[in-house]
Image (cartoon, coloured by chain):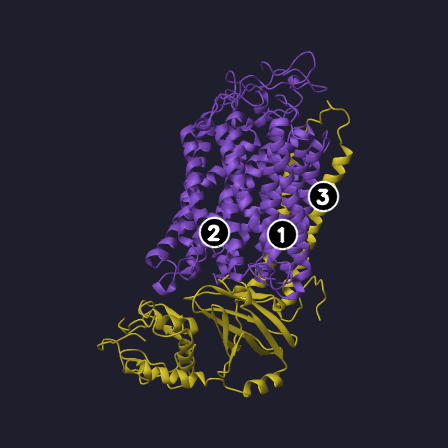
Amino acid sequence: MDGTTTAATGEFQLPREHYLNAKYGIRSWLLTTDHKRIALLYLASVTFFFFVGGIFATLIRIHLLTPNGLLVTPETYNKLFTMHGVAMIFFFLIPSIPAVLGNFLIPIMIGAKDLAFPKINLLSWYIYLVGGCFVLYSFGTGGLDTGWTFYTPLSSIYSNSAVTPAVIGIFINGFSSILTGLNFLVTVHTMRAPGMTWFRLPLFVWAHYATSLIMVLGTPVIAITLLLAGLERMFHFGFFNPAYGGDPILFQHLFWFYSHPAVYIMILPAMGVISEIIPTFVRKPIFGYSFIAASSIGIAVIGFIVWAHHMFVTGEATYAAIAFSFLSYIVAVPSAVKVFNWTATLYKGSISYDTPMLYALGFIGLFTIGGLTGLFLACLGLDIHLHDTYFVIAHFHYIMVGGAVMGYVGGLHFWWPKITGRLYPEYLARAAAIILFIGFNLTFFPQFILGGLGSPRRYSNYPPEFQVLNVMSTAGASILALGYLLPMVYLTWSMRYGKIAGPNPWPTTGLEWKTNSPPLTENFHETPVVDWEPYDFVHRPDLGLKGAKPPGKLAPAHGDD
Amino acid sequence: MQSQLPLYPESASNFAPDVDGLMLFIVGVCIFFAVLITVAIVYFFFRYKRKTPDEIGAPIHGDLRLEITWIVLPFFLLLSMFGWGAVVYVDYRHIPSNTLDVYVIGKQWMWKLEQPNGRREINELHVPVNRNVRLILASEDVIHDFSVPAFRVKMDVVPGHYNSMWFRPTKAGRYHFFCSQYCGTSHAIMGGWVTVMEPDDYAAWLAGSTGSGDPVALGARLYNDLACNTCHSPDGKGRGPSYNGVYGSKVRLADGSTVVADDAYIRESILQPTAKIVAGYQPVMPSFQGLVSEDQILALTAYIKAQKDQPVPVKPAAGEPATGKK
């Protein structure tokens, strides 16, 4: 770790050479095959789509201040919530953690120089951009009003909006996901450093391994499903429209076969982030490592066989509904296992409340509420009442925003010193985390009550008795917006003016913290050898913590598979 | 009168107590776990706050007994939620006999409803209190959903399918119904009111008008106009089977299986005649897809239903040059 400290002051300095100053110029970014630079390209593009989706969300919440709608026509409102969903799900949430944090960290965490296929990694980003351009073209030329679920025959026949370019865009974007997933799988299998056995992998890597399985196995299904809907729209092939001999329910089966596992694509990486943050700020091993790792795989596998719980009131066979309800309850078990283990990790820890830890604790709380409310919807008798109401909206925002986005923003804070070499203003960051937490709950908790009252989703206007709860929700959303703007501002500021972080500011145990901040283009000067167990603070005298013992005679790694 | 900040909807059907009981049970379990986790986090957070900057936590790696406990215990709780929920759902999906049948057609963006005597309504539904009501749902275009929060019921209205739902209103009054499956531009105004009336009031209301005419008479007219009668003669001698006594009976099919001749079967036989061939007949009937509206299908169904008690003709003997599809 040359040139990172000056002995005189103890202050850190940036390393002389790192991936950010290795080359300059626009070509060095657009043609880079460095996974860290590609991660930053993704960071810029997913942030852009987060803004686009966020603006739609803002307009939606303002519109819903009054029962008859304040701002736009019903037609425009329908486009707003559709485009909010499409931008956020396909172009922000699905790529966010894997393509930004996963891309940046997975090779460093396992001690590799890059992903297995660096050029394919760059290709994924370009495919994402091309898909994104088609979708933006759809937004710009008439917009999209089918709902992000594209239910047929509304999307394939009846909608008068720009469905075709959007469907093509999402189809193309699917390949980006597939290639990223494939890249991660091959990398984790083949490029682990000596001593980095499967059960020494950080849980972040386990979570991404599970996510990648879903990406590779599930994404082709949604791609082909949307393509079929597009073909029906363009050429009137009868896949889904009964007037042409198709079946609209078939579309829902195919759509949810991917789109339910896609929820796990969004949440599993966030769980991985939380599993890294908690041991760091509790300074003890994560409780039940193998149970957390196994639960990620369990969620990925069982997640593939619960899809028809989105269809309990479509008239599907009673026995099918019973089977899918049962399986949906089963998938709740591994999620609960994670929550219990994270909580147990706090026991007898040495807990600090640095910003990433606040996000992690917020995540546990919000994800718990999101997960528990899923039990209401998996319940057959109760889903008859709650299906397609605001209860569903609140539930999945607790999972996706309270869970996935909190995990993403928490992870950005946690690894920001590694990515940029600099620290952000800590007290401002803590304030932002608390503002986000409060704003989020005020926005979405009232929607559970709205849903219990039966207020249907996707309504541009609503009966007047629902107004008070809608106003509360909009008030919360304005706090939430502030909570998002703050980190954008101070993180950007810190890239130039933040305090130099040093290689391991927290300090913590992962391999990524053994290299410079920011790392070299090759990540490490020489291939690291892993001879410690994950999240072990005791046998790590290099961290400079009290009571550390020498590395000692650890059992040698079980083979070097 | 609703308060400014209602917390739970009115209860006005047989399903409301079931669904609300389930809701209370799951809310209870969830609050227990949410409080457990929250209290644990907050307690640990303050109890084990870092005291010196270089302090580390106790090196605890896990505990198998705890892991098993928090896998097995939640599993059984989840199982109880599943089981109870399934019981309520099976009750909802199993439609009792002897219901008051109302036909409901959804189209962008209105509801057309038709009472048994042919009285028609738009975006209004009148039903008597304490009587099992079945709604038979059809769509003319996209997927809609008929949802009555005060009854705790909803069902998708899917083009190309007949779906049915039922409920027994338990309290007279007026209740919102909504379209709760997104169906395009004016989705948000595709709703109306269910009026639950005392039986006498309902009878008086029903007698007040028969709307655009008796559905059986309309169906009889269509039976001639669409030339159904050329094949489906009442005496069973035509190329297709007779309608007499068909509705509600078990029909034996060419492949040896049997099917109950309900609304969905009749609808399918009009639109996709070759899907199910009655034993002893040939698949010669053309499809009426696109030639008859959902309204007309309902009228034809009503007509066929009215022939339920007519004498059933003797089936053509096997070996006779058999003819047509029902």
The answer to whether residue B61 is visible is no
User: Mark 3: which amino acid?
Assistant: Thr
Q: Who is closer to the viewer here, B100 or A323?
A: B100
Q: Amino acid at mark 2?
A: Trp
Q: Position of residue A491 (x, y in %)?
A: 62, 33
Marks 2 & 1, CB-CB < 8 Å contact: no
Q: CA distance from mark 2 to mark 1?
A: 19 Å
Residue that badge 1 annotates: A373
Q: Earlier in the sequence, mark 2 or mark 1?
A: 2
Residue under numbered circle 3: B38
Q: Secondary structure at mark 2?
A: helix
Q: Which chain is purple?
A: A
Cα–Cα gap, marks 2 and 3: 33 Å
Q: Secondary structure at mark 1?
A: helix
| Chain of the residue where label 3 is placed in the rendered structure | B
Q: Which chain is yellow in the picture? A: B
Q: Is residue B263 left or right of residue B46?
A: left
